[in-house]
Amino acid sequence: MGNLLYIIAVILIIGWAIGFFAFNVGAIIHILLVIAIIAIILRVIQGRKIV
């Protein structure tokens, strides 16, 4: 489950970067970025090793 959260976070960050620099879609992209950062922070706090 933790590995899935990490993958989702990476996908969301990539999506944010593409949307921000290529399309400048707006607030929805920033919401995706916040979700991705929260997932990464939870991963770090849990202290589990990325496999």
Image (cartoon, helix red, strand yellow):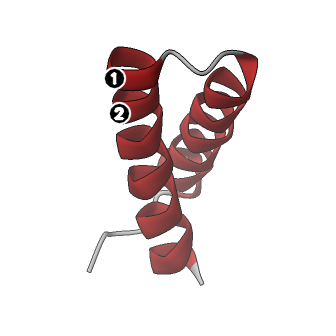
Disc 2 target residue = 18
Q: Which amino acid is tagged 1?
A: Ala
Left or right, 11 with reference to 45: left
Disc 2 to disc 1, C-alpha distance? 5 Å
Disc 1 target residue = 22
- Give the residue at x 66% y 15%: 26
Closer mark to the observer between disc 2 and disc 1 = 1
Mark 2 and 1 residues: CB-CB less than 8 Å, in contact? yes
Q: Is residue 23 above or below residue 10?
A: above
Return the x and y of residue 32 as percentages of the image width and height: 64, 37
- Give the residue at x 42% y 40%: 13
Q: Which amino acid is tagged 2?
A: Ile
Q: Is residue 36 above or below residue 10?
A: above
The quadrant in which residue 49 appears is bottom left
Q: Secondary structure at mark 2?
A: helix
- Give the residue at x 30% y 70%: 50
